[in-house]
Image (spheres, coloured by chain):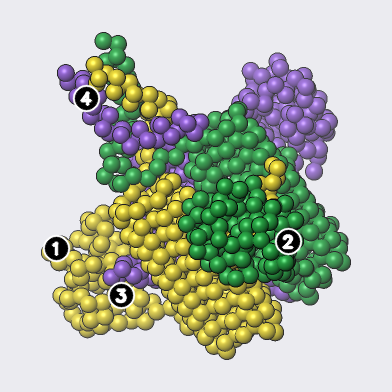
Chain colours: A purple, B yellow, C green
Amino acid sequence: MSHTLGDIAKTIGAELEGDPGCEIKGVGTLEHAQPGEISFLSNRRYAPFLKTTRAAAVILKQEDRALCPVARLVHENPYLGYARTARLLYPGSEISPGIHPLAVIDPSAVIHPSAHVGPHVSIGGNTRIAERAYVGSGCVIGPQVEIGADTRLTANVVVCAGVKIGARGLFHPGVVIGADGFGIANEEGRWLKIPQIGSVAIGDDVEIGANTTIDRGAIENTVIEDGVKIDNLVQVGHNVHIGAHTAIAGCVAIAGSVRIGKRCMIGGASGISGHLEIADDVVLMGMTGVPNSIKEPGVYASAIPAMDVGSWRKNAVSFKQLYAMNVRLRKIENK
Amino acid sequence: MSHTLGDIAKTIGAELEGDPGCEIKGVGTLEHAQPGEISFLSNRRYAPFLKTTRAAAVILKQEDRALCPVARLVHENPYLGYARTARLLYPGSEISPGIHPLAVIDPSAVIHPSAHVGPHVSIGGNTRIAERAYVGSGCVIGPQVEIGADTRLTANVVVCAGVKIGARGLFHPGVVIGADGFGIANEEGRWLKIPQIGSVAIGDDVEIGANTTIDRGAIENTVIEDGVKIDNLVQVGHNVHIGAHTAIAGCVAIAGSVRIGKRCMIGGASGISGHLEIADDVVLMGMTGVPNSIKEPGVYASAIPAMDVGSWRKNAVSFKQLYAMNVRLRKIENK
Amino acid sequence: MSHTLGDIAKTIGAELEGDPGCEIKGVGTLEHAQPGEISFLSNRRYAPFLKTTRAAAVILKQEDRALCPVARLVHENPYLGYARTARLLYPGSEISPGIHPLAVIDPSAVIHPSAHVGPHVSIGGNTRIAERAYVGSGCVIGPQVEIGADTRLTANVVVCAGVKIGARGLFHPGVVIGADGFGIANEEGRWLKIPQIGSVAIGDDVEIGANTTIDRGAIENTVIEDGVKIDNLVQVGHNVHIGAHTAIAGCVAIAGSVRIGKRCMIGGASGISGHLEIADDVVLMGMTGVPNSIKEPGVYASAIPAMDVGSWRKNAVSFKQLYAMNVRLRKIENK
């Protein structure tokens, strides 16, 4: 879907320096954009490509204007400007309504006629699929589930009994929502499984990455509020509560009953211990371990950065003496 | 399924202080239980809710009796008491025997007539599915597999050739059992794949969480003993041996040929290097790295806890000088 | 498929000390090999089993000959020798060509007559499946995909629109290739999804482990070069570029736009931050955190090894004072 530069500038709220009638057919990186494509400069790492770009136009900040040899769309947040542009040029495909003859649907399920149900799908009793929802090939939807309007389950997604999902959600392949939480009690050295009778409640505009798992609650629900975005291979334990507009990068492990605030950003491969709280507006860098509640907004970290293996071996051994070193140091200071 | 308080007290082995005829219809948290529901107090974090709970009865310890305004079931391990209660009140649904017409089953496979095989399932040659086993929608079972009595593969579970699974197992959606181990040999800078000719042997009463993967052995089998409980998104490498009644939380990475003892508890997001042994009764806290064998039972840890990013930056830089600091400290001490 | 020792020695390039006519039917470990099986000694941990092995022959190094009571195949790299032997004895099964009647295939897709398409598969428009490729039960292949000759998608693999996969690939169950990258822009506290219009290009001879996810590019492609081997539950973010013959162990998290060189070895559960470069021939030990580019080949690490929880508590607390300790130490030195 092509648009003129003038259209784009207006839609994204940028000041245009260039021909408003110029036709834009797609987006490209500064390095590889072709004529007719629009690009952007947000991460300064890529500034060197500006000079030689073949893009038809570039979305950039006021201060980078002078460096740009082609048409400019000046925007205070070029990444956001790019996001809006890409959404304009690539609006996504319409879904084709209807139920594939190889889908197996319980007679008591209610599928809106505008929804799409692909082949090899199963849908359980009393489940409701709302208007324009998309249930792709191989998805397994349990009984008593609700899938909101315009929500898409791409392929091989599993949604277990009783889960409620809001509108405009996007669930990538292999996602599992509502499997049993890890609830076991020790009985003389053996584990007794505890029935997981809660479910999962997911708000509107939630995106869940491929192969991520969100467990059902032990008694009450696991809750994912509106606008939460979760990347791939994330584990969300039972009874976790994730506040609205929080974003969680890949491979994060969140233990049971954690309460994460609104607008947090959780870096990849972080781990959060059970039964604790993280305030609103907390940012965790990648690979951060969180063994205690975080009560103040701010940026937190704990990862040790990579070093050559020789140094690492010495330093890692010294770590085991760290407290002792502290004591020794105090002893010297006290003299 | 409702039960009287008297029944429940007897079943879970608690001393009842209250009306034994009181009818209990379900469980609830202290905070949100409704009349007719039973609750419990195990984690002291939730003690403040005791005073105002609307639960019909609470399972708790001797020392918490005085705080409880409603009927009491006194138990020395309230969490275990709760587990038994929940199992009584929520016994799980019966499976419906039969093979769905959209399942594709090799003629040489033997499916017990009391077993359930859902739609979109494939089952390979000479595979045996025992009595009352459940193979849910989208599962793919290879040839020469054995699935024990009462074992449930919920949905989209993949079990590869030759895997043996015991009785009363529970395998959550997306689990993959018996994919090839990561066996490669370097040949002049290229990787040569090594056929993985072992398989996986899983005992009775094993539960495996969503999207967890357990690789087949290189030569001999990967072995999961009876009563092992594994959470979501755990990787179990080839030829790992996990002792009976060990519990493993989410996102743990276990490299090949590791031998883990009985009754261990492995905290979430821990990592265990290849070819080492972990004794019986070892507990790893979350995010622990294990590069060497652990020969003594006990509790182990290694994670650095989150701190504000400013402190972290300074401390992480100093970590690279830790051994040097130790040397400098010794130098001063020697003076 | 049985072979004589003479055949094996010739194929793997080993010097044989023993009867070249001896028939070998399979492989076994030193500890458990049966008569008629061949074994190997590579990891010295297993040397004690050499003396009592019942194997018909052992592949080993020159220096271990004297310890071996049975026929010997002397090889400078016994593990590679074993790999070649196992490939000879276990060549893998032929695929059976044809399309299962329960596969759903877009009429514009082109499936080579020698390819296998299993039950419960979906294949999108204009997708091409080359000769002898295998698409196992439950796989979902989007439109405009290319699957190269002899590539195998075992079961429940999802390959999204436009992905190109080379020849002789092996994709284990639950793999997801080409789901959307985690591209979101913040707009006044809410996340705006950025269309992910790139795709994924995968070379020849690539193996991808169970439930691993490889995201499609934001604008250009995510690229996996020839001969790359990736283990289970690995996350590869959008626009990552992985150089030829790099091997990545399980549970690694690779953020977006990372460029990894050729012949690297990435240890399990490592994490690599976004937009950075890792040189050719870099080795990361397990659980290494990489927040900055690594420009020199070599071995790198950062994990803290497990210690008993008492020591850990003290040392972890002292870590928060590490920079301060460094300052205090300097102060003393300056006196």
The residue carrying pointer 2 sits among few (fewer than 14), some (14 to 19) or many (20 or more) residues within 10 Å by Cα, namely: many
- Parent chain of label 3: B
Q: Residue at x 31, y 42 (%)?
A: C312
Same-subunit check for callouts 4 and 3? no
For mark 3, give the secondary structure: helix
Say what amino acid the circle numbered 2 marks. Answer: Gly
Of label 1 and label 3, which has the lower sequence position? 1
The residue carrying pointer 3 sits among few (fewer than 14), some (14 to 19) or many (20 or more) residues within 10 Å by Cα, namely: many
Q: Which mark is residue B63?
A: 1
Q: Is residue A320 visible?
A: yes
Marks 3/2: CA–CA distance: 66 Å
The residue carrying pointer 4 sits among few (fewer than 14), some (14 to 19) or many (20 or more) residues within 10 Å by Cα, namely: some
* Residue that carries the numbered disc 3 in the rendered image: B85
Marks 2, 4: nearer the viewer: 2
* Residue that carries the numbered disc 4 in the rendered image: A330
Say what amino acid the circle numbered 3 marks. Answer: Thr
For mark 2, give the secondary structure: helix
Marks 2, 1: nearer the viewer: 2
Say what amino acid the circle numbered 4 marks. Answer: Arg
Q: Residue at x 72, y 63 (%)?
A: C20
- Parent chain of label 4: A
- Placement of the N terminus of chain A among the 4 image quadrants: top right
Mark 2 touching mark 4, by CB under 8 A?
no
Residue A19 placement: quadrant: top right
- Parent chain of label 2: C
Say whether residue B2 is left or right of residue A22.
Answer: left
Residue A105: % across, % down = 64, 75
* Residue that carries the numbered disc 2 in the rendered image: C6
